[in-house]
Image (spheres, coloured by chain):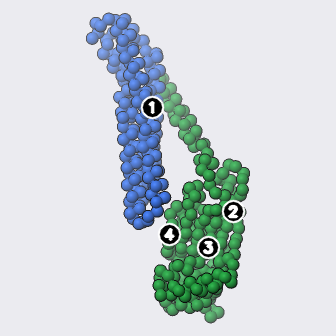
Chain colours: A blue, B green
Amino acid sequence: MEYLGAIIDYGVIGLLIVMSIVAVSIAVERHLTYKKIKIEHFRDRKELELELTKKLHIIATIGSNAPYIGLLGTVLGIMLTFYSIGREGLIDTGKIMIGLALALKATAVGLIVAIPSVVFYNFLLRKVKVIMMRWEIINGRKGI
Amino acid sequence: MNEQRIGIVTSLAIHASFLILFLTIPVAGAIPYTKTIYISFVQQEDLYSTSHKEMKPIMRSKAEHAQSINKPEIMEIKQPQDEFLLNDKPVTAAVQRAEYSTIAKTEITSIGKAVNQGVAETTFGNSGAPAFIHREMPVYPLLARRIGREGKVILKLLLDKNGTLQDIEVIEASGFGFTEAAVAAIKKSTFSPAHSNGEKVPSKAILSVRFNLK
């Protein structure tokens, strides 16, 4: 059963770390793109919107799903703890508590990944809106 | 495309710095752990009470009688390298102390022999029982040490008549790696065989390993 514990630990937490890296890199990339973008080059509003909202869904997905993945890791960890208790038949409270406490770290990592992702998503969404409004101010509402 | 590259590099840098920060937090220093470790090899009279219930009162009185004659020997081993690994502060070297009693209980040996013909069943410390030639000290498990857990492991060693270890049977296991530590130490130790009437005999010997923090 040790390998299952390792899979839960390294698999879930590794997946969450990869998700976090992806989310942050997309957020940085989007931020730089918004800084450089020239709204005069876009004649169509939809074209601009398409360019601005590219990849944003990835951040949104990571922000909403990271807690669930963390929770999954916790549930598997608790399952494993109870299984090993049942198999060994021990009534050592300390061991149970340590197993449960270590299982909860997956949820903690999930939340640590999710909170900045949601913040980035809202921040970028606001920027998209601002750029769209600037385009509308320049071009009127003819593109709609 | 350039932004994408910058984004990936920045993200990796942020995560790497967080990981380094997280890993360098001195966890060992944050948890106060005790300085002295006691690992004792003592014989366990209660063991007989579980396997041979009717003999319990005899064993007790013998053991008490023997205890009053012989004092347990105490062996101290300093483990500075262990301390260095665990704690940055150059304080109080970890003292690992092994306690084992050499108590003569010839009657028990003979009773044990009757149960298992051919193989003498005995306990470490008895006369005629196997003894350590080289005693490897068990390593106190790191996790148990950090969270301050103590434990007791009871093993039954099967030795042939040359004193070579044939088999280890765990009679009472303990969590937190105590069992593994005890078994690993026993595997590295060497023993002298049991004696019966001046002859070397194969034996089953019970050894109790106690891990204590003081």
Do marks 4 and 2 both belong to one polypeptide chain? yes
- Crowd around label 1: few <14 · some 14–19 · many ≥20 (10 Å): some
The chain to which mark 2 is attached is B
Do marks 4 and 1 both belong to one polypeptide chain? no
Q: Which residue has dot 4 on it? A: B173
Query: Which quadrant, please, contains the N terminus of chain A?
Result: bottom left
Residue type, label 4 = Ala
Q: Which residue has dot 1 on it? A: A116
Residue type, label 1 = Pro
Q: Are marks 4 and 3 in contact (CB under 8 Å)?
A: no
Q: Are marks 4 and 1 in contact (CB under 8 Å)?
A: no
Residue B41: numbered disc: 3
- Crowd around label 3: few <14 · some 14–19 · many ≥20 (10 Å): many
Residue A136: numbered disc: none
Q: Are marks 1 and 3 in contact (CB under 8 Å)?
A: no
Do marks 4 and 3 both belong to one polypeptide chain? yes
User: Residue A23, percent across and down?
Assistant: 43, 32
